[in-house]
Image (tube, rainbow, N blue to C red):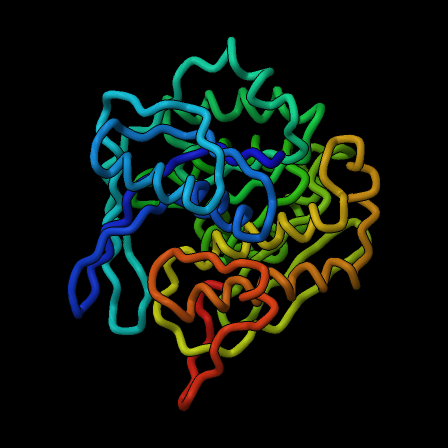
Amino acid sequence: MLTVIGEGLIDVVRRPSGTESHPGGSPLNVAIGLARLDHPVQFIGRYGDDAHGRMLTEHLKGSGVLVPLPADTAPTSVATAQLDHHGAASYHFDLDWHLPDLRDRLDTLLSATTLVHTGSIAAVLEPGADQVLHVVERARPRATIGFDPNCRPTITSDPDVVRGRVERFVALADVVKASDEDLAWLYPGVDPLESARRWLALGAPEGPAIVVVTRGADGPWAVCRAGEAQANPPRVRVADTVGAGDSFMAALLSGIVDRELDGAQRRPELRRLDVRELQRILEFAARAAAVTVSRPGANPPNRAEVRAGAPAPSSAPAEGGAL
């Protein structure tokens, strides 16, 4: 069992052509992505007992994700994404991020879990962020930890505060993914690849085994104990970039699970991952993200779609900006 903990929300997407509403939230998208890649997944998050909350639960269950926590009485969170003519998104959030008291249920929720993933708003916005940190600390002795900061400066505008919180999660994580934009915001004036190399040393000797940087059209790059790897992104015509990084993260974790490297007992083997195998994982994750950017909204692919690849561009191709 894989466990994703974090925010679920409704993405209200405003395009030049009109407005649509879709289930979203970075951790929720990762849970959907993992389920569509044929992994058993549960999602631990919050949502309201309202129409938006019912949309989230139907979306999760429709992809086979288990939802062990009930709805609460607060409104479901909403993110409004404004898309420009190139499909790039800017966001406005109306959030309520907290979790119920999980102390009496946590051992049961995590009993069969071999991997826990979190990130984004859930890791930095109080009061839920401290609860998420507690879950990760409790899970780490038994499970691989995945983390994606997916920074949202419009919500948490002080990089000094966010940096400290992010580094606490990085030090506990085994597999970390960040965009070059995340790292540039957290560490102004520092090469994002150098920041990733520094993250690899956080929590040493038990810090991350893999740190990945996504770089838009330049493709993903990663560092592990054996060295560095990168992959060329597929060329696709971009519908929009919503959810592309989350599809990449789900496929990155899927690559770890497919190789039976999940679970705390496999941590030494994960740290011995060689560069060639890391490159194969990056290529798989980049293909998943390319499928997502080729169609509207946060719509992660299934395994057959990743194998088939994104539709080829018909003319004047654009690169997948969120890869």
Q: Is residue 182 above or below residue 268?
A: below
For the residue pair 154 and 70, the one nearer the viewer reads as 70
Q: Residue furthest top?
A: 104
Q: Is residue 303 above or below residue 168?
A: below
Q: Residue furthest bottom?
A: 315
Q: Position of residue 79 (x, y in %)?
A: 26, 45
| Res. 183 visible in picture | yes
Residue at (44, 36) in percent of width and height: 162
Taking 102 as reference, is 116 left or right? Answer: right
- Based on the displayed image, in which of its 4 quarters is residue 213 positioned? bottom right
Q: Position of residue 209 (x, y in %)?
A: 73, 44
Q: Is residue 111 above or below residue 180?
A: above
- The tally of labels here is 0
Taking 300 as reference, is 108 left or right? Answer: right
Quarter in which the N terminus is drawn: top right
- Based on the displayed image, in which of its 4 quarters is residue 99 positioned? top left
- Based on the displayed image, in which of its 4 quarters is residue 117 positioned? top right
Q: Position of residue 93 (x, y in %)?
A: 25, 42
Q: Position of residue 101 (x, y in %)?
A: 43, 13
Residue at (18, 69) in percent of width and height: 16
Residue at (38, 68) in percent of width and height: 295
Taking 8 as reference, is 37 left or right? Answer: right
For the residue pair 54 and 238, the one nearer the viewer reads as 54
For the residue pair 293 and 195, the one nearer the viewer reads as 293
Residue at (62, 48) in percent of width and height: 253
| Res. 161 visible in picture | no
Taking 262 as reference, is 310 left or right? Answer: left
